[in-house]
Image: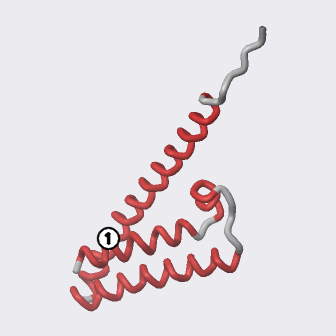
């Protein structure tokens, strides 16, 4: 059950991150329409709340909320590392394309 809620939290946090203009610029190189961005944010919040509900019902609310707090921390850390990796990969590809341009020689 903890793996399922951890996966829910990771997916929900990823959708919440993708719902911001800054991350869309990093990952997609353009911003999505406002309605689609709002839908991503709502879906992300719904999925994260679903994970909280499952933890609360499975372990009881006091202990479930403690577990949920830990799960969201791990999920946010995982999503943050994925965003760092995506930004690094994009900047390396951009620098490679700059350095690999064909050179012309003048005589």
Q: Is 66 on the left or on the right of 76, as rendered? A: left
- Residue for point 49% across, 77% down: 44
Q: Name the residue under label 1.
A: 71
In front: 104, or 24?
Answer: 104
Where is residue 50? Give x, y as percent. 39, 86
Dividing the picture into quarters, in which one does residue 69 lie?
Answer: bottom left
Q: Is 106 on the left or on the right of 98, as rendered? A: right
Dividing the picture into quarters, in which one does residue 39 lie?
Answer: bottom right
Q: Residue furthest front?
A: 107
In front: 104, or 75?
Answer: 104
Q: Residue furthest right?
A: 107
- Residue for point 24% across, 76% down: 2
Question: Is 103 above or below relative to 72?
Answer: above
Question: Is 31 above or below relative to 11?
Answer: above
Where is residue 16? Give x, y as percent. 52, 71
Dividing the picture into quarters, in which one does residue 6 lie?
Answer: bottom left
- Residue for point 63% across, 74% down: 37
Scheme of colours in the image:
secondary structure
Q: How crowded is mark 1: few (under 14 residues within 10 Å), some or many (20 or more)?
A: many
User: Considering the image in quadrants, where does the C terminus appear?
Assistant: top right
Q: What kind of element bears circle 1? A: helix
User: Considering the image in quadrants, where does the N terminus appear?
Assistant: bottom left
Question: Is 105 above or below relative to 48?
Answer: above
Q: Residue furthest bottom?
A: 57
Where is residue 17? Give x, y as percent. 53, 66
- Residue for point 57% across, 57% down: 27
In front: 68, or 27?
Answer: 27
Q: Which residue lies furthest to the top in this view?
A: 107
């Amino acid at each position: 059950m903890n793996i399922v809620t951890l996966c829910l939290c990771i997916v929900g946090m990823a959708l919440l991150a993708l719902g911001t203009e800054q991350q869309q610029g990093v990952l997609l190189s353009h911003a999505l329409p406002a309605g689609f961005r709002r839908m991503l944010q709502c879906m992300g919040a719904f999925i994260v709340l679903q994970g909280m509900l499952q933890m609360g019902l499975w372990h009881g609310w006091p202990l479930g909320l403690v577990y949920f707090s830990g799960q969201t921390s791990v999920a946010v850390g995982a999503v943050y590392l994925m965003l760092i990796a995506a930004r690094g990969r994009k900047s390396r590809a951009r620098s490679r394309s700059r350095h690999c341009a064909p050179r012309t020689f003048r005589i």
